[in-house]
Image: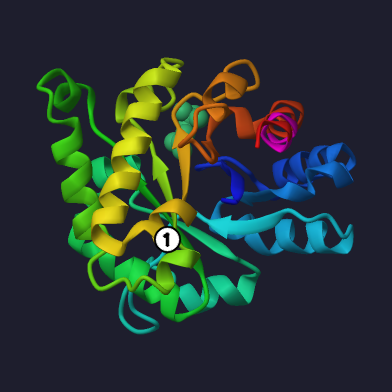
Amino acid sequence: MRRTFICGNWKMNGSLDETMNLIGGLVPRYQDSFVNVEIAVCPPFTSIALAHSLLSDRGVRIAVGAQNCHDQQKGAYTGEISTRMLVEAGCTYVIVGHSERRAIFSETNEFINKKILAALSNGLKPIVCVGETHEERELQRTFEVLLEQLRGCLRDVTAQQMHQVTIAYEPVWAIGTGKTATPEIAQDSHSFIRSEIEALYGKEVANNVCIQYGGSMNASNAEQLLHQPDIDGGLIGGAALDAESFMTIVRIASQAH
Ligand code: PGA
């Protein structure tokens, strides 16, 4: 059985006050029946320690992740943060290769690969984002782009390490736009990603790897998406900023798998 994983990507939202309110909304909505779902939230760096302490004080099984990291552990990298620092602050996960980082901060597959290797060697579980732009989809280059991103990002990651890795399929045209991929389109890409993981690592790893969908997933469309055979969870942006919506998605996930 594959793990089901719902993760909130708060992006650049979540001052200390907002974090306190949002975590305060998640905690009472958490139910023991959600135990079959892995749950995490990824606040901005400055709110990670607070989110972690609020959640662990309340004994709620929601982990904390970061939205980015650097591949080096220390030194002259002004403005960057290392994977060890993130672990120290309470992170279990780190999102890498988000399309906003690729597009706005020019991150390449090569750099993302270094971050993934750094995360894995320091006990952080990477959530590796891949996905095509609208233009690439129009040009029927989706699978080619996914292939290039997967191969580039996962270089030198071993089959053993793949157990710690989550893949997030996030079609760029669906992020923050309200334009969710149809369940069929998403399933098609997820199944392609799994087949590529099989080509790289064999059947066992492919069957076990958790592939999240991300891109305007919300409480209304989560059910249809999560019922697709190769969609194992969600990376949620906008809807993760509302405790009720986020925990509704978690509940749907706990019933879907
Ligand atoms: P969205 O963002 O749910 O707001 O589309 C998802 C993401 O960027 O991870």
Q: Is residue 251 inside the magenta stretch?
A: yes
Say whether residue 180 is visible. Answer: no
Identify the residue at horizontal 42%, vertical 44% (top origin).
Answer: 168
Local crowd at mark 1 within 10 Å, few (<14), some, or many (≥20)?
few
- What span is in magenta? 250-254
**Side (left or right) of 204 relative to 248:** left
The secondary structure type at the circle numbered 1 is helix
- Where residue 228 sits: x, y (%)? 50, 28
Image quadrant of residue 233?
top right
The answer to whether one can see residue 50 in this image is yes
Relative to 225, does residue 125 appear above or below in the rendering? Answer: below
Q: Is residue 96 magenta?
A: no
Q: What residue is shown at x 48% (from left), y 80% (from top)?
A: 122
Considering every residue shown, the one lying at the far front of the view is 203
Query: Quadrant location of residue 180?
Result: top left
Q: Is residue 53 above or below residue 250?
A: below
Q: What residue do we see at 45% from left, 37% from top? A: 230
- Residue type beneath disc 1: Glu
